[in-house]
Each structure stands twice: as C-alpha cells, then as structure tokens.
C-alpha cells in the first residue's frame, strides 16, 4: 500500500505550529476538515508497490499542487516558500526542520501520477461528500450557468508568449534599478522561436548573475515564471495554437478564444458538477450532464434554476421524465422546432445569434414577413458566405456558388 510509505515524524519543534499557525488559519482548517486519504486510493495504480525506493507521500505532493493553485505561484516559488512558511509545512504534514522537495518533483507528479485522472470530477465529488457529512449541504436545488475561459495561450504565437513574459521581467527590473537597462542583452529581432528562447535564456542569466537584484522578491516571481516557461513549457509553446480551443461569444461584438466551463452550484454555493467544452458550444446542451454529475457526486436534485439557454425542448422533456422542476424562462428562439438541421445550428443566448457547426456565428439577423401578422414574421440569420466557401463542413450546408447563407 502507498500509505505505508508515509511515516510519522516526531519533532522537538512541533510545538511551534501551535504558536505561529492560529486555529482560524485557512490551511489548518482545511487539514482538520478534509480527509485526504482518498488520494491513496485514486493514485494507487500510478505507483509501483513492489520495488524501487519509497516515493514522496502522494498526499504531500497533492497538497503542494493545492498550495500552488491557491497562491498562484510557480513550482520554484511554492517550494521556496514552504522552506520558511510554517503554515505551509503544517499543511504539508512536515516537521518544522524537514527539508523540502525539489521543484522538478512537482512536474513529474503532474505528468506521471495525475495522468488520465479525472481530477476535476474527483475533487468536486469529495467536496460534495464533505459538505453532506458536515451538514452544510441541505438544499435540493442547483443553479446552472457557464463561464468563459480563454485558452492558455489566447491565440498568441510562441514567440509572443516569451516576449510578453520577458517584457514583464524587464519592467520589474527597471522599477528597481533603471541603470541596468544599458547592460541588458540585446533583444531578439528575428522571427525564429529558437532565437527568442536563446534571448530569454541570456536575459535570465544576466539577471541572475550580473544584475545584483535577482533575489529581490519583486523580481523573483517573473524571473521564475520565465525560467519555467523556457525550461518546462517549450514543447507546449510549439503547440501554442491550442487546436482544441474555439471562438465563443459573450455578446454579438465580444468574442473570446478558448473554452466554457459549465457549472452546477447549490444555494449554499457548493459546486456539484462541471463540464468543460470548447467556446462555441451551447449552454443548454450541457444541462443533462450537469444534473447526472451532480447526482453522481451525491446531490439530490429536485429543482434546476437557469436562464433561457436551458429551456430547450429536450431539457424540458428530460426534467419532466426525471421529476425535476426546471425553472428557466422559455425562449421561442431556442425551443422552436421549425428550423431545419435544428441540432446542428445552436442558439447563443449571450449574443442572440445562431452558431453553425464550424463555430461561426451569424453576422446579422433580419425580420421578414408582413408586419402585424405575427406568425407570418420570422427571423432570418445570415452568415459570412466567405467563411462558408472554405468551411470543412460546407457539404450539405452551403451550395457552391451561392452568394449568401441564411437560416430561419
């Protein structure tokens, strides 16, 4: 068993924790409330249990990553802080005098131990389980909505990413000592990624060895971030276009490149389910998955509250069949059944426009039909025909040579 690798460390300095880590400290409270032993069960198949030297306790490694996420620090900085911050050491289950891990261990843990683990669903499930045990979760209603998440590299080229992080580092240095500007290595002027990487390495070496201010806290974090990007993320930088991301719309005039996080939350503000999709996906199509995931996490769902995007016909039928009350304003644009290819063109309620299967949004809409004769008037949505001409989904959707593309 992995848990047998963990040993109880007795320290003559353990009493320090009672002095410097107060009872209301967030990390102390998390330790008291959460039983992290589930990590052993989830990661057991990721370790060799019969030979090799003992691994670092997986709970401790997992807690390192929690600290990294909570405090938004690089691997190097989170390990450095754990050397002297006793609240960190207490949370990590270490004695005050214990040595910390090498930062590279966190990279290996993420890539080897957490590979293929559905971490998000696992953590949400444990959160709901804990809330039920502590009698915090009492409601039977969930609120559903979606948030927009930009892609990691936000359509920037690898070179632009490095330039941006190098610029932030130089700016931090200049605020401390503007006189070093004349000594800085010459900026890269080519369009080659390898040249930009070489410049960043020169910049890092200069600041670490010649600037005299590399250890100033204001400089350390942007310096470490640039070092980590060059050393650990070069492979990711070469794939910076993020082929899985898509363009989504917050409104007709406001777009973003990335993903959507569809969430279900209780009245107590406890997240019970999450579904990640590309940015162009319709919110309403994720409702059934959010409900099923909430149930799987231990939530009893009797009422679902959402906006007009969730009042699709399929959702109404699904909630009725499962005896769930759906509280969402009906939108005739969403629920109407007169359109052709209804399942292919999805309505974006934020922008008030339809989106085609390729993720392209209609560029305008027009009201057609005789005024004053209600049912005879229909909304027609027009798409950019130039995009349609080169679209990989155009077969059966766009007629070759057509000067417009519209749906009603």
Image (cartoon, grey):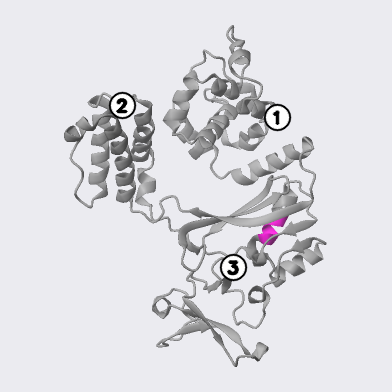
- Residue 307, x across and y down, in percent: 66, 63
Crowding at label 1, few (<14), some or many (≥20) Cα neighbours within 10 Å?
few
First in sequence: mark 1 vs mark 2: 1
**Quadrant in the rendering for residue 14:** top right
User: In the structure shown, which secondary structural element does the residue marked by tag 1 occupy?
Assistant: helix
> Would you say 362 lies left or right of 341 here?
left
Whole-Å distance between the Cαs marked 2 and 3? Answer: 49 Å
The residue depicted at 72 percent of the width and 56 percent of the height is 291
- In terms of sequence position, does the residue under pointer 1 or pointer 3 come before the other? 1
Write down the residue under mark 2: 214
Q: Which residue is mark 3?
A: 349
Dot 3: what SS?
loop
The x, y position of residue 220, in whole percent, is 36, 29
Magenta stretch containing residue 332, yes or no? Answer: no
- What residue range appears in magenta? 287-291
Number of other residues with Cα within 10 Å of mark 3, as a class: few under 14, some 14 to 19, many 20 or more: many
Nearest the eye: 166 or 174: 174
Main SS class of the magenta portion in the image: helix
Which of 253 and 117 lies nearest the eye of the viewer?
A: 253
Q: Which mark is residue 102?
A: none
Q: Which residue is mark 1?
A: 33
On the picture, is 378 further left or further right than 84?
right
Q: Is residue 197 visible?
A: yes
- Mark sitting earlier along the chain (2/3): 2
Q: Where 365 falls versus 168 (above or below)?
A: below
Instruction: Give percent across and percent down for residue 27.
Output: 61, 27
| Label 2 crowd (10 A; few <14 / some 14-19 / many >=20) | some
């Amino acid at each position: 068993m992995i848990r047998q690798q963990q040993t109880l460390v007795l320290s003559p300095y353990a009493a320090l924790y009672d002095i410097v880590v107060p009872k209301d400290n967030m990390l102390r409270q998390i330790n008291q409330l959460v039983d992290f032993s589930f990590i052993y069960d989830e990661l057991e198949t990721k370790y060799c249990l019969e030979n090799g030297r003992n691994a670092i306790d997986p709970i401790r490694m997992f807690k390192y990553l929690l600290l990294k996420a909570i405090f938004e620090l690089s691997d190097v900085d989170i390990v450095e802080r754990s050397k002297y911050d006793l609240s960190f050491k207490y949370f990590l289950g270490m004695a005050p005098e214990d040595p910390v891990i090498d930062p590279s261990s966190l990279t290996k843990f993420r890539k080897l131990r957490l590979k293929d683990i559905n971490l998000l669903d696992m953590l949400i499930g444990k959160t709901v389980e804990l809330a039920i045990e502590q009698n915090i979760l009492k409601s039977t209603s969930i609120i559903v909505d979606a948030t927009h998440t930009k892609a990691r590299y936000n359509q920037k080229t690898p070179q632009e990413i490095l330039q941006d992080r190098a610029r932030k580092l130089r700016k931090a240095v200049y605020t401390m000592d503007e006189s070093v500007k004349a000594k800085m290595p010459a900026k890269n002027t080519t369009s080659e990624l390898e040249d930009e990487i070489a410049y960043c390495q020169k910049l890092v070496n200069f600041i670490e060895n010649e600037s005299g201010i590399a250890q100033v806290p204001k400089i350390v974090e942007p310096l470490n971030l640039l070092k980590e990007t060059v050393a650990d993320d070069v492979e990711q930088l070469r794939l910076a276009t993020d082929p899985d991301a898509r363009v989504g719309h917050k409104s007709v005039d406001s777009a973003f490149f990335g993903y959507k996080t569809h969430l279900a939350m209780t009245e107590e503000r406890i997240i019970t389910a999450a579904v990640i999709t590309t940015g162009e996906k319709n919110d309403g199509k994720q409702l059934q998955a959010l409900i099923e995931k909430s149930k799987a996490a231990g939530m009893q769902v009797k009422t679902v509250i959402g906006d007009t995007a969730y009042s699709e016909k399929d959702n109404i039928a699904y909630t009725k069949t499962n005896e769930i009350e759906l509280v969402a304003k009906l939108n005739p644009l969403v629920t109407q059944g007169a359109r052709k290819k209804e399942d292919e063109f999805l309505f974006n309620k934020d922008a008030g426009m339809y989106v085609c299967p390729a993720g392209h949004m209609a560029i305008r809409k027009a009201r057609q039909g005789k005024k004053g004769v209600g049912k005879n008037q229909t909304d027609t949505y027009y798409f950019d025909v130039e995009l349609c001409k080169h679209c990989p989904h155009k077969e059966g959707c766009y007629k070759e040579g057509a000067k417009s593309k519209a749906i009603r």
